[in-house]
Image (spheres, coloured by chain):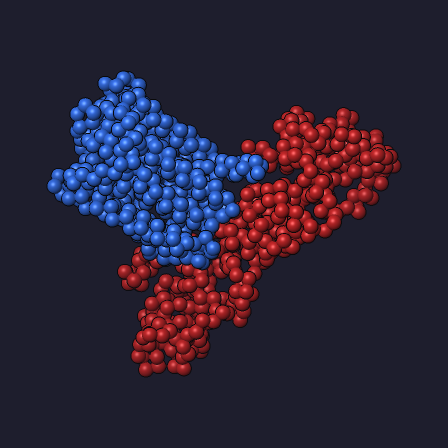
Chain colours: A red, B blue
Amino acid sequence: MDSELLYLTELVGLAVYDLKGRKIGRIKDAALVPLIDPVRVDRFLVGGGWAWLTIRHDQVRSIDLEGIHLSDEQLTPYHADEYMFRLVRDLLDQQIIDAHGRKVVRVTDVTFEVRRTPEGDRLSVLEVDIGLRSVFRRVCEGVVPRGIIRRLQAPIPPNSIRWEFCNILEPDPQRRLRLNITHKLLETMHPADLADIVEALSPEDREAIFETINSEVAAEALSEVEPEIQASILESLETEKAADILEEMAPDEAADALAELEAETSEEILEEMEPEPKTEVRELLEFGEDTAGGLMNNEYVALHEGATVAGAMAALRGNEELLEGLTTLYLIDQDGRLTGAVPLARLFLAPAASPLKEVAVEILIQASVEEAQERIGELFDKYNLLSLPVVDEDGKLAGVITADDIISLLRKK
Amino acid sequence: MLKRFRHHIAVFFSVIGPGFITAVVDNDAGGIFTYSQAGARFGYLPLWTLAPITVLLVVTQEMCARMGAVSGKGLSDLIREEFGLRTTFLVMAALVAANLTNVMANFAGIASSLELFHVSRYVSVPLAAAAVWLLIVKGNYRSIEKVFLFACSLYVCYIISGILVKPDWKEAAIYSVRPVLLLDPGYLTMLIGMVGTSVAPWMQFYLQAAVVEKGVTAREYAESRIEVIVGCVVMSVIAFFIIVACAGAIWSTAPRDIRDATDAALGLQPFGRYAYVLFCAGLFNASLFAASILPLSTAYTVCEGLGFESGVNRKFREAPIFYWLFTFLIVAGGGVVLLPGIPLVRMILFSQVINGMLLPFVLIFMILLVNKQRVMREWVNSRGYNLVAWTAVVAIIGLTLALVSITLRGMGGA
């Protein structure tokens, strides 16, 4: 067999022997240099006498449970190296994100693959271990001989995460760069899963994640986070980054998030935003939290009542970013007053030339911006709505409430 | 100005829960017994200890709440990160042992309080265990917290029964502020017992986890601290009324030792049916409440510390160790009470010993953690606060170890 497994727990404390078989000391830690190689154990740190020494990976001849034999004796004293990711110090017992299992886990042990090459044995990180088996191993290590632990742990099912799915958490941006820690893995997750993960983390780790992932993903994830945590994240970020994220959020959600902040902070962030989303959000912030105005979104598609089906299709083609979640088009007159609603599905069945007025719903259900949220929920329930237009005191279309807003509202209670 | 004030009130109500519940549950079956005993044997004399006890509680609880709010992590998490897995494992093992005996003591409290209402323990204990299990497994954090806060409000039973006994309020007021030291071994043991039972290891873990679970952040911390202080004061007020009730009812007629908390309730009988019934109901409520929180808190803490999936919002299959541990604590804790011939009093004393042995470690870990810049950033203890905190910790440890040695000697003699 040319490859086998070794655990970090077993590696630490292994005796190290020089060319003549004299014992130099014992392994204290092992380090990766992620900028060079993300999986290879690059250095071993040995404690012997009063100082620590560093062994490079190419100075090792053999590694097994009995000890480590070197092929080269030119060892250098250990000095703190910013580019070194030390497994015992920086990984063991710390929290990481399992991007595959979509949860926050605590590292109990690390599994290495030992490759036997003609130049000597090489270690690379294979998996991070969590769960009962690794706890058992850690607790017994040093008390029971290594070989016996291996036999005793065999019946316990392993619980491990492949190294490529592990997302390390590091609050210091400088160290993130030096250690090549990115949050690219997190950007591939569903924003709702990312939101759950973020809620389980400490405030500084949350901040680190939102600082680095792209604003679009950050915005989607932030919309799903609990309001109080939303507020603490926005406050901790640089104003500019917070503004970038809020621009990407749906205006009603951005407004809700800003409403949770102190007036001063929320004003600062608003000032940093692009003019268009800024006005939208500002408008929404005017409304009371418990009213239809506070619930609605001002991203909707409204067309002049005289338009035709073909005209509507053309308008939709020009506004692709609105299509996701769009169920209804609204018709307005010259003065912006709401006159009708057209369910999207009806567009496909109607002839291209027919006026939109003819395909509009027969009975138009609408609500005023001052309407209480309780009542809005009742309307959705009673008329089985997917979306509900909201009008101001002049009958002008002010915004739209969609079913997902209602679901969030009901869940909050 | 008014708006600011209203804002603070609103934030206060949003953070209410963790500190309050922790402090109030501190008056569980064991605590009630200790205070009843103090009142029955020494009357109003021990009342002065409540003020220093409140201070000790506030100091320790405040540090936990702060750590939870700032780090966003539980105490067992932080111990794991800073002191390694083996230390955590040992602390967790001791915590399970200590809390298991605490759960037993509280199921015993349920059994004996309901027996006064002629309900057999073979009915009350299984029913209570099933109710506790269902509440936690089927509920979610918010609904459970509401039930717990409701249970807190039922402690008013003790206040009413204290008033019904018509104790000597003037005496009570005087001795609340006048420290009295008697060089009587019984009196000293009682004082040590009162302090020793007031700070328990589980409270530190529970409080910090609850603060984190509640999502309290550093910016709401000011309100959270007030909540912790209010909780500790309420706990002392309840303890005050328990002592006063027993002093007024038992000590004023004939000072004596009581066997358990229900014995104290019987002593209240001459003062009317209500005083007696309320005292029993209070004991039942307190025991049931503690029997719900302790298994939950233990399972939660252990799984967090050792990195197993935990939390009532996960399914049984997703967090098997959490649910098994939780179920084990309830079944074993309740089951032992039903076994004939189990020396329950000895087990409760034994629980005090394990709690007492574990507490110094927990407190020292806490104070080391709360001073770590890496964990607490600018929220580490100030120098002055550290002086207070270390004094409090040393005092608690000293008194707890004294209690342990007294208990051990008593157990050896018995």
Please, which residue is most extreme toward the top here? B272
Q: Is residue B221 left or right of residue B23?
A: right
- Percent position (x, y) of residue B242? 29, 29
**Left or right of residue B156: residue B353:** left
Q: Position of residue B309 (x, y in %)?
A: 43, 47
Residue at the location (46% across, 64% down)?
A125
Is A213 above or below relative to B298? below
Residue A181 place in picture, x, y as percent: 54, 62
On the rendered image, what quadrant is the C terminus of chain A found in?
top right
Side of A185 where A85 appears, left or right? left
Is A277 situated above or below B378? above
Instruction: Indicate left or right for B28 with A337 as reference.
Output: left
The residue under the point 29% across, 34% down is: B176
Question: Which residue lies most toward the left here?
Answer: B413
Residue B276 x, y percent position in the rendering: 28, 21
Question: From where the camera sits, is residue A280 visible?
Answer: yes
Q: Quadrant of residue A310?
A: top right
Q: Is residue B336 visible?
A: no
Residue in the image at 55% along x and 62% along y: A173
Quarter the N terminus of chain A occupies: bottom left
Q: How many numbered marks, from 0 up?
A: 0
Where residue B46 sits, quadrant-wise, is top left
B45 or A371: which is nearer to us?
B45
- The quadrant holding residue B82 is bottom left
Asked whether B358 or B23 is in front, the reply is B23
- Residue drawn at x 69%, y 43% as measured from the top left: A281
